[in-house]
Amino acid sequence: EPEVTQTPSHQVTQMGQEVILRCVPISNHLYFYWYRQILGQKVEFLVSFYNNEISEKSEIFDDQFSVERPDGSNFTLKIRSTKLEDSAMYFCASTKGRAPLYGYTFGSGTRLTVV
Amino acid sequence: GDSVTQMEGPVTLSEEAFLTINCTYTATGYPSLFWYVQYPGEGLQLLLKATKADDKGSNKGFEATYRKETTSFHLEKGSVQVSDSAVYFCALSEVATSYDKVIFGPGTSLSVIP
């Protein structure tokens, strides 16, 4: 069964450093997403991406965050200057069509620890 | 705004017991409803879904029926196994408010003991 692949599985970074989280969505999917889950808290929507542009973003997704699909297969989330409160599990997801009808296929996540 | 409420956990059951995890939602229109499962150390997996009232989603012995009159989508399984130990998330997505965003409940942790 096709999978969404995320790398690395765990990233430790110093506060203020830039990090890039990488995702390879399922090849025939068209919609891409990032969610995060702070330990013990809800899974929160960050951003959705379609046709090479952001289609929706949450209030969490401020100027420190950006997304890119640089080469038609990878989908990346960049945090420019990490803060302690960015420590969380970050999940990438993709869908063939719109989320309300299809539901997501999630990757297994990247645990980001900011120290 | 839209929201999802789930019964608080953790829930601990013996193997072969009956499982119910309650989920209720608040939405302005007609959302699609989902259950996701997160096994230890893994990402979220779509377990089942229902896109309109009275639909029943089912998968791997789990079922949930979309009840518009009670705004509920309770998850049930007749006989749980140790391998069902995981965190279960109820979720909704509503085209009227967002084409893309899925709103998750807080999750309910289930432990099944032999």
Image: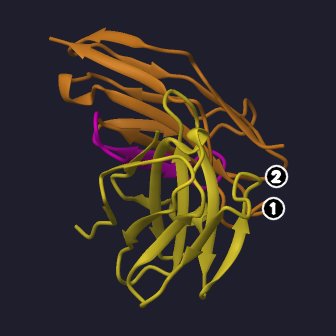
Q: Residue at x 82, y 52 (%)?
A: B29
Residue type at numbered disc 1: Ala
Label 2 crowd (10 A; few <14 / some 14-19 / many >=20): few
What is the chain identity of the residue bearing mark 2? B
Q: Nearer the viewer, residue B23 or A74?
A: A74
The chain letter corresponding to yellow is: A
The chain letter corresponding to orange is: B
Q: Is residue A71 above or below residue B43?
A: below
Question: Are the residues tagged 1 and 2 within 8 Å (C-beta)?
Answer: yes
Magenta segment:
B40-60
Q: Residue at x 42, y 27 (%)?
A: B76
Residue for badge 2 = B29
Q: Quadrant of the C terminus of chain B?
A: top left
Asked whether B26 falls inside the magenta stretch, the response is no
Q: Nearer the viewer, residue B66 or A105?
A: A105
Q: Residue at x 41, y 22 (%)?
A: B109
Residue B110 drawn at (x, y percent): 36, 20
Q: Which mark is residue A19?
A: none
Residue type at numbered disc 2: Gly
Q: Nearer the viewer, residue A77 or B98?
A: A77
Element at badge 1? loop
Q: Residue at x 46, y 63 (%)?
A: A93
* Residue B58 horizontal side relative to residue B72, left or right: left
Residue A55 drawn at (x, y percent): 70, 75
What is the chain identity of the residue bearing mark 1? B
Asked whether B53 falls inside the magenta stretch, the response is yes
From mark 1 to mark 2, how far is it between C-alphas?
6 Å
